[in-house]
Image (cartoon, helix red, strand yellow):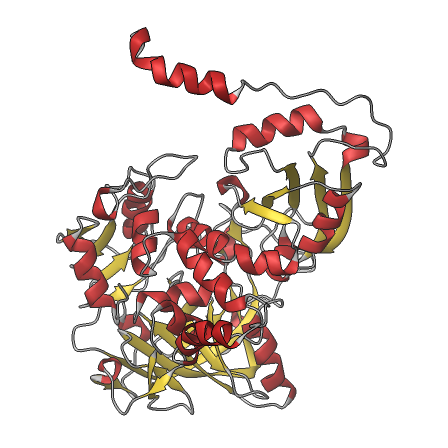
Amino acid sequence: MPFNDLPSFVAELEQRDQLRRVRVPVDPVLEITEIADRVMKSPAPEGAAGAPATDPIHGRQGGRALLFENVRGSTMPVLINAYGSYARMKLALGCDDLEELAGRIQQLIKPVMPASLLDKIKKVPDLMKLAGSGPKTVRTGPCQQVVHTDDADLCSLPVLQCWPCDGNLSSEPPAEPPAPTIAEAPGAEGRTGRYITLGGTLLRDLDSGQYNLGMYRVQLFGPKLAAVHWHVHHDGARIFRRYAERGQPMPLAIVLGGPPVLAYAATCPLPPPVSELLFAGFLNQGGIEMVPAKTLPLEVPANAEIIIEGFVDPREKFVEGPFGDHTGFYSLSSPYPVFRVSAITHRRDPIYPTTIVGKPPMEDYYLGKATERIFLPLLQMLVPDILDYHLPRFGAVHNCAFLKIRKEYPYQARKVMHAIWGAGQMMFSKFLVVLDENVNIHDEQEVLFHIGANVDPRRDTTIVDGPLDILDHAAPYEGVGSKMGIDATRKIPGEGPIRRWPMELSMSPENQEKVALRWAEFGLE
C-alpha cells in the first residue's frame, strides 16, 4: 500500500502500534539523540499482520518510531526512527516482502527480448508501470501552503545536534598542514552543531537536465546559511563540479517528508542514467507529484512537509564538521560548499522528519539492508556469479561484504572480488569474503567458521589499492587505501598448492526427517 505523504504514513504506523508519541518537552540538542538511540537498540514490536519484525541474525530490534510533539525552540513535531525496523521498512516501500520487491525489479531489468507476440503482450504491463512512474507536474501542492522568503529562518526548524562534539572544531585532533579556521569562512559566525540529516537533496544536472535526489547532511551556520557535505564520488558532487566549471551558482532544494519512498530512493546506489524520482515513482506505483519551486528553476515534491530552497555558490566554502557518523566515529572537518537559503515553504502543520547515525544498529541500518535485498538483481547483472550477498552490521554498510557463489573454475572467487570492486559504490568494500553456495552467508558465525576452516592466509588472501569511503579514518590517505579479499571457498586444482579437501560434516536428510517426525516422542521440548 503506497503512501502519498508523511502524515498518512505516520497514521498507519500508529494504527499498527509501530509509533509512540512523546508529549513532554524535549531538547533537539543531544536529548532526542539519547532517547532515540536507546529506542533504536531496543526490541521492535511485532511486524505488520502479526509477523515478527526479526533480523535473522541479531533478533528483533529497532524499537518503535517516535513522534516528539513538544520540541523546544520550534512549533514543529519531530519524527524519528520511522524506517528503523524491517516491518516499517516494508511498510514504507509498500511491500509485504523485500524479496518480492527485488523480483519486480528483476522482471523490469531482465535483458531477454520477447520471442513472440504473446511474450510482447505479457511484457506490456511491466513497461507501462515503468512509463507511468515518472514525475508529474501539478500546479499547487501542500508543501507550499506556507511560504517564507525574506523571513526564511533555518533556526526555526527543530534541527538536531546529534552528538556532543558535532560542529566543534576544537574537539578534533590538529590537522597537518593546519586546516583553515572557521573565521576564514565569511558569514559563518552562526556556526552550530545542528545538522539536517534526513533531507533529500534535489538538484538538476546542467547538461542532461535530469533531476538527482541524494541524501547529504547539511550543517546549519545561521538563519539562511548552511554547508552541504557530499563526497567527491557522489552524484551531487559530480553535478556541482559542472556548475563550478562554468562559474554558475547551483539551485538546490532540500526535501523533508513526502511519500516515504522518497527518502529511501535518495539513499539508493542507482546507476547514473536512472533518476531517483523515477525509481521512487516505481516503488510508489505512480509518479511523484511535483510543483514549481518558489525561488528556483526547479520542481519540488508537492506532498513534502518542508522544502528549503537556495543556491550553492562554487566560490564559497565553509569548514563543515566534525560530525558523529554512521561509522561510530566523528568524521573530521573539511571545507564544503556553502548553501544560501532563498525560501522555506511548508505545510500548515508540518512534521519535521530526521534521523541520527552512530554505532549500528540504527535507523540507517534498515535502509541499508533494504537496499541489499532490493538491489541483488542489479548486482547480479553486473556480476552474474553472485548467488547472494550480505552486508554485516559490524561493517557499517561499506566496510565488509560476504558473497556467495557456485564455484566452477579456479580463481573464480578472485574474479568476483575484482568485479565487485568495480561495481559502483561496492568499490568502497574494504573486506570481501567469498563463500560456497552451501554457506548461509547471513549467519555471521557460519561465515567465520568457513574462514577459519578453508583459508590459508598466504594463498587465499589478496590485497589491492583503490578508492575507499571518505569517512574511512583508517585509510592512509583520504578516500584512498588498500582492500582485502578473502577466498573462503573450497580449493580446487589450479589454485596453488592444495591437499586433499575433506568432506564437511552433515547428517543425511532422511535421518533428519525421521528425528523431526519423532521429536515429540522424546520429551525434549
Quarter residue 40 falls in? top left
Q: Give me the residue at 66% from left, 58% from top.
A: 479
Res. 184 in view? no
Q: Is residue 230 above or below residue 288?
A: above
Total label count? 0
User: Relative to residue 204, is residue 351 drawn left or right?
Assistant: left
Q: Quadrant of the N terminus?
A: bottom left
Quarter residue 360 falls in? top left
Q: Position of residue 436 (x, y in %)?
A: 64, 36
Q: Is residue 89 above or below residue 485?
A: below
Res. 403 in view? yes
Q: Is residue 458 above or below residue 202?
A: above
User: Relative to residue 442, is residue 517 drawn left or right?
Assistant: left
Q: Quadrant of the C terminus?
A: top left
Q: Position of residue 116 (x, y in %)?
A: 54, 74
For the residue pair 201 and 524, the one nearer the viewer reads as: 524
Q: Position of residue 133 (x, y in %)?
A: 39, 77
User: Relative to residue 493, is residue 217 drawn left or right?
Assistant: left
User: Relative to residue 206, is residue 214 drawn left or right?
Assistant: left
Q: Give me the residue at 62% from left, 84% from top.
A: 242
Residue lying at the far top of the rendered structure: 522
Q: Position of residue 322 (x, y in %)?
A: 50, 57
Q: Give me the residue at 44% from left, 48% from top.
A: 358
Q: Give me the residue at 35% from left, 78% from top.
A: 287
